[in-house]
Image (cartoon, rainbow, N blue to C red):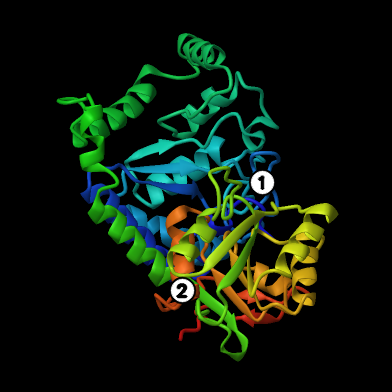
Amino acid sequence: ANPVIGVRSFGADPDAVAELVAAETAGYQRSGVAATAKHFPGHGDTETDSHYGFPVIKHTRAQWEALDAPPFRAAIEAGIDSIMTAHILVPALDDSGDPATLSRPILTGILREQLGFDGVVVTDALDMAGVRQKYGDERVPVLALKAGVDQLLNAPKLDLAWNAVLKAVQGGELTEERLEESILRVLRLKAKLGLLDDPWTDEDAVDDKVGTAAHLATADRIAERTTTLLVNEGGLLPLAPDDTPRLLVVGADPASPSDTTGPPTGVLARALTELGFTATALSTGTAPSATVIERAVAAAAEADAVVVATYNVTATSTQRTLVERLLATGRPVVAVAVRNPYDAARLPGVRAYLATYSWTDVEVRAAARVIAGEAEPRGKLPVPVQRADDPTRVLYPLGHGLTY
C-alpha cells in the first residue's frame, strides 16, 4: 500500500535489509563511490507519497527501534559517507509537527548524537511537497541547516535559498561556525574521494571504467539469481521453442517498449527470439484501453503462448482486464511482474508468474532466460505477498520462491 517506496527498499525483514545495506555500502565505497542511505528516519511505512503530500509515520519509538533503525545503524557501522533525510512526520521522535528534514531532535539528537553519525547529511529534494507544506521555500533551507543538515538538495529557487541563508547568518539565526561544520564534512568527503587532488573526469575513459564486459556479466548473474518464480501450476515453465514456438509479448512499457526497427520488437520479445522462439511484441501500457485489449486478444489467437509484463496492478487497473481476457483465449499465459511483486495476488488465474523487481534490460533478459529454461529461477521473495481480497492473510510468504 506504500505508493512511493516499493522496490526502492531491500525488503520487509529489518535484519536482512540491514545486512544488504552494509554490503552495498561496502561495495560502493570500496569502488570509490560515496554511498547514501535514505530516507532517515525511515520511509517504509507511508501511505502518502512525499513528492505530493506530507506523510505521517505512526510507529512508536519501540517500533522505530525495531523496524526502521537497524538498516541505518548497519549503514553507519559500515562507514557510510552520507545519509539522506525524509520529508515525513514522525510524532514519536519529534512531536513538533516538523518534517524530519527540519527536525533538530531527529537529525542532531538521534542521527548525530545517539547513532553517532558524523558523515554528510543531505536533504531529500526541497522541491517536494512533504517539506514545503508547513514552511515556505525561504524558511526551509534555514531550518534544515539549523536541524543539522549539511547539504541542501534541489532547492526550488536557488537564489531565494541562498539569500535566505545569507540573511540568517547576518541576522544571527545561523552562525558561521554551524555552517563551517557542514563545509568541513563536505570537504572531508571530497578529500576521501580524491576530488581535491584530481577533480576532473576523462570522458574518453568512461567505457573502460563503467559497463565493461565484466560488469555486464556480473549484472546478468545477479539478475538471474534474483528472478523469482512465484507460481508455476502444472509445470508450465519453462517453455520450449519446439512446443510453443510463437509467442506474443504484451504488457507495460518499458518491458515491451514500442519499437519501430522491425520485428521482433521489445526487449523481452527480442530476448525470447534470440533463445529460439518467434516472439512478437505488442506494447499495451500500464492502462490498456478497450481497443488495445481487443488488439491483444486478437493477436493471441495467432500465438502458442502469451507473455505479459505487469506493472503495479491495482484493484481497478485495466491490466487486470487485459490478463483476464488473455486467459479466456485458452492460450497459456506467463506473467512477469516488472515492478512490485504484489501483482501476483491481483491475477489469481495466471498459471506461471515471475517477479523481476525491475524493468531494466538486464532484468528483462534474465526473465527471458528463465522462461526458456536457460537459467533456473533462484530468487526468493524479500516481502510477503498478501491476498488481494484479505490483506491479513499471506498468499506467498517472505522467502517464497520456486525453481525447476
Q: Secondary structure at mark 1?
A: loop
| Image disc number at residue 49 | 1
Residue at position x 42%, y 60% in the image: 71
In the picture provided, is 139 more to the left or to the right than 114? right
Q: Nearer the viewer, mark 2 or mark 1?
A: 2
Answer few, some or many: residues within 10 Å of disc 1's Cα (few below 14, many 20 plus, some between 14 and 19).
some
Q: Quadrant of residue 27?
A: bottom left
Q: From the viewer's perspective, is residue 158 above or below residue 149?
A: above
Q: From the viewer's perspective, is residue 120 above or below residue 45?
A: above
Mark 2 and mark 1 lie on one chain; the one further toward the N terminus is: 1
Q: Quadrant of residue 346?
A: bottom right
Q: Which residue is mark 2?
A: 370
Q: Amino acid at mark 1?
A: Asp
Can residue 14 be spotted in the picture? no
Image quarter in which the N terminus is found: bottom right
Q: Amino acid at mark 2?
A: Val
In the picture provided, is 40 more to the left or to the right than 87? left
Q: Residue furthest right?
A: 290
Q: Quadrant of residue 295?
A: bottom right
Q: Position of residue 260 (x, y in %)?
A: 58, 42
In the picture provided, is 376 more to the left or to the right than 318? left
Residue at position x 59%, y 41% in the image: 87
Q: From the viewer's perspective, is residue 310 above or below residue 54?
A: below
Q: Position of residue 61 (x, y in %)?
A: 56, 60
Q: Position of residue 35 (x, y in %)?
A: 34, 46
CB under 8 Å between callouts 2 and 1?
A: no
Rounded to the nearest angstrom, the CA distance separating label 2 from label 1 is 34 Å
Q: Residue furthest bottom?
A: 234
Residue at position x 47%, y 11% in the image: 166
